Amino acid sequence: MSHDLLPHRAEWTAAARRPSRDLLAGLMVGLVALPLALGFGVSSGMGAGAGLVTAIVAGVVAAVFGGSNLQVSGPTGAMTVVLIPIIARYGADGVLVVGLLAGMILLGLAYARLGRFIRYVPIPVVEGFTLGIAVIITLQQVPAALGVHVHADKALGLAGRALTSWFADPTWTAPCLTAAVTGLILVVTRVRPSLPVALVAVALATAANAALHLGAATIGALPSRLPAPSLPHVPWGNLDALVLPAVAVAALAALESLLSATVADAMSVGQRHDPDRELFGQGLANLASPLFGGIPATAAIARTAVNVRAGASTRLAAVTHAIVLLLIMLVASRWVGEIPLAALAGVLIATAAQMVRVSSVAVLLRATRGDAAVLVVTAAATVVTDLVTAVILGLVVAGWFALRQTARTARMEEEPLDGGDHGDEEHAVLDEQIVVFRLDGPLFFAAAHDFLLELSEVSNVRVVVLRMSRITTIDATGAVVLGDTITRLEARGISVLLSGVRDQQQHVLSSLGVYGRLATARHLFATTPEAIAHARVHAARVTHDPHTEREAS
């Protein structure tokens, strides 16, 4: 095992010096996390108890072994979106096995040192992904918010069926509870963001439901202790079918955890996470959680932000949050089971609303057409398809716009006859039927065809000199198209001379036979003045036969 992935004594030495702030921060995060853990457990289909177990077990393991001092882990809305179709198809055991497989994948990513690649995910993809998740979480809460029981594979279909069922027999208890909880959280959070308002709102809704005999459906029985660890039943017949969902869960855990750690770093002073160790910690957390009946977990951006704002500076805060939840399970599970499902729906709807940074979305929509398209496509794909497909599609669209923008930087310009680096010589070549072209930027598959096609149509000259020193990169497509262009020009009696080819580009041009397309190997020059001097020899000739010249050389 690589030692730099393991916990260090210095991390806990710092916690022992000033534990009070971390203990208070952990208490605050625990109170905030309780309704979220219960709500996401219910939303996933595994039950509120599974959500609470996940917050405790994964919360401790990820805090101890993860790569951030500030990160808080547990069940999240994004993960529940992935888990719902898995539960519907493979049942609870399928989800637990997927969690174990995802943990193994995350450990593999950590050992392969792939954590640093998260920085290459474009911001519009992240914002679109987050926006789509917020929409899905909201849609998933519609049945509980309306007090109806319906089922559907997709969030849109679930919300539609819930509305249809409610309109057929409308009742107002659940919608009123949901609206009251959502409104209270959103209003108070804007005034006092550090208060655990979600817990207060849920407590008030629970008290009102019991005291006024409103009859709203409740969570029901919760475990009063942690289950004994055990291996889940492995559906060997469907194991191969669980691999792809496990990859999706691992990808989401890696993406959300590393993004959350980045956010925590930005909110704090002097804190920097280790991305590979964070993947290692999340891998262990997802191996541990299913053993106790918990669902796959990831770092939670909202809870991490609360942790930072509450003054946390070490891992002790995240561990304390898990201990607080464990104590609530041991002491107060009977009262927690009386929480109305509509109140939890209100908590999750408010959480979804707080996930979306309206200012960031507005800025991206106004920034460039490409950024706006990537954000919209990623968000829409998240809602309509699935999260992994949405991220892949967003990356593809972002890559297409990046390639198009890069291709636009590629230019071919005829050197001006009255200026430039070699102005005097270019005045002389005018009457000698020599034309000098400067190639700028990348010569690659997205840019090569257009301007090299223009080059192949050059006429009324005897020699073309191509200045290659400003080409930033050449790929196989660019080299092949350049070779074809040289062949076309040589076939029309126009000699092609290359100058200033960079050392790092020599290999691809030589390997793909570009130099072999020149009339002679002597048509390759280190500098443009040398190429122009040699060009005068050809320009002075009355006729030009490249085949004869090749034989003569």
Image (cartoon, rainbow, N blue to C red):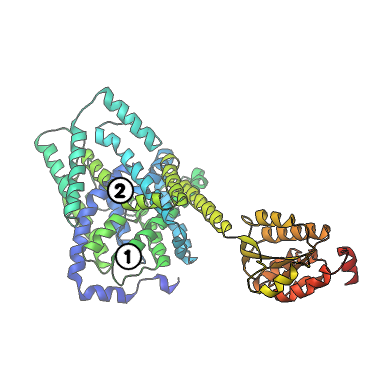
Nearest the viewer among 296 and 302 is: 302
What is the quadrant of residue 428 in the picture?
bottom right
What is the quadrant of residue 20 in the picture? bottom left
The N terminus lies in which quarter of the figure?
bottom left
Label 1 secondary element: helix
Kind of residue indicated by mark 1? Ala
Q: Are marks 2 and 1 in contact (CB under 8 Å)?
A: no
- Distance of mark 2 from mark 1, alpha carbons? 32 Å
Look at the picture and state if 416 lies above or below 75: below
Q: Which x, y percent locates residue 501?
A: 68, 71
Q: Position of residue 171 (x, y in %)?
A: 21, 27
Q: Residue at x 27, y 69 (%)?
A: 314
For the question of whether residue 49 can be seen, the reply is no
Query: Residue at point 50% right, 43% down?
Result: 238
Front one among 395 and 459: 459
The residue under label 2 is: 50
Instruction: Pick whichever, 266 or 217, lies toward us.
Output: 266
For disc 1, the marked residue is 266
Residue drawn 70% across the image and 71% down it: 426
User: Counting residues from the N terminus, which is met first, the one under dot 2 or under dot 1?
Assistant: 2
Residue 339 lies, with reference to residue 532, above or below; the image says: above
Q: Secondary structure at mark 2?
A: helix
Q: Would you place residue 420 above or below residue 107 in this image? A: below
